[in-house]
Amino acid sequence: MTGRYESFDRARWASLRASTPLTLTDDDVVELRGINERLDLDEVVNVYLPLSRLLNLHVAATQSLNSVTDTFLSTKRESVPYVIGIAGSVAVGKSTTARVLRKLLSTWPDHPRVDLLTTDGFLHPNAVLESRDLMSRKGFPESYDTGALVECLQKIKSGQPATAPVYSHLTYDIVPEETVTIDRPDVLIVEGLNVLQSGRGSSALFVSDFFDFSIYVDAEEDQIRTWYVERFLTLRSSVFQNPQSYFRNYAELTEDEATEVAIGIWNEINAPNLRDNIEPTRIRADLILTKGREHAIERVELRKG
């Protein structure tokens, strides 16, 4: 990593917790943990409590700046959410990071309302992807209705309520006529594969333009592939067994067959997306969380300045 980041090992980062109280229990951690992840209270204490403290300081500073501007202009604006973006590969654990931060940030008194928006809801419906021959590129930038996502974030950043589509991981598709409302939270966490992409020279707004702070969850590619295969095997014996599951045809595969299928999906879809679209945005993050082989965060890199 270049000199634009300051790097912290786990012990040094943990010391920055200061007096931030632990507000989660073992039961909370079990509820927040993703499939096959090894999140525990030690990780919360040593990594996420310091991070929640940092984010709380950022939110407070932004709220103070907004107050100064209102005083100068003699105006009173609608409360504008502080927006945090979280990016990273499939199976790296970014959804767990988002859930843990949501839980911790909601315990700070100055911003108790914390919402979570996942970009899965802005994937084009399968019927649209099929008509455009994009089903094999689901999760790539072109598979999202980026215009709708940007419009949603514009409303949120303007202090207005906004609605977002709902995605079902069971049916692997958008749920027809179902939406979720984001109604002026204090903090909004936006989690997704490609949320740190820029406009690539375009003058149009992009998702990352709305972020006040951004996080990239990282790990070595071969390790992420292992986690992806492990997760696929776990889903094969659980969610895929549901008759409504889009992946029901994988439920009866042997372990060897399922492993071969998972590796094939990784090599054909997830690896190219990671290399071409996701990993290149890593350097745009304000903070990088790097995981080791046991899914534990071993290093934190914070952008200087």
Image (cartoon, helix red, strand yellow):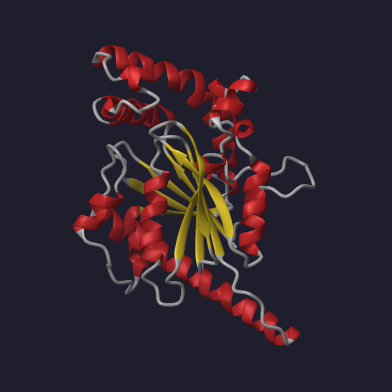
The quarter of the rendered structure image containing the C terminus is bottom right
> Which is more toward the observer, 242 or 95?
242
What residue is drawn where x is 57% and y is 76%? Answer: 63
Q: Quadrant of residue 280?
A: top right
Q: Is residue 175 left or right of residue 93?
A: right
Q: Is residue 62 above or below residue 180?
A: below
Q: Residue furthest left?
A: 26
Q: Is residue 295 above or below residue 49?
A: above
Where is residue 183? Give x, y as percent: 53, 64
Q: Is residue 144 above or below residue 206?
A: above
Where is residue 20? Give x, y as percent: 33, 72
Q: Residue 107, can we see it?
A: yes
> Which is more toward the observer, 272 or 10?
272
What residue is drawn where x is 59% and y is 53%? Answer: 4
What residue is drawn where x is 40% and y is 77%? Answer: 109
What residue is drawn where x is 51% and y is 23%? Answer: 269
Q: Residue 13, can we see it?
A: no
Label tally: 0
Where is residue 212? Give x, y as percent: 59, 61
> Which is more toward the observer, 21 or 98?
98
Where is residue 178? Give x, y as percent: 50, 46
Q: Is residue 76 above or below residue 112?
A: below
Q: Quadrant of residue 36?
A: top left
Q: Residue furthest right?
A: 203
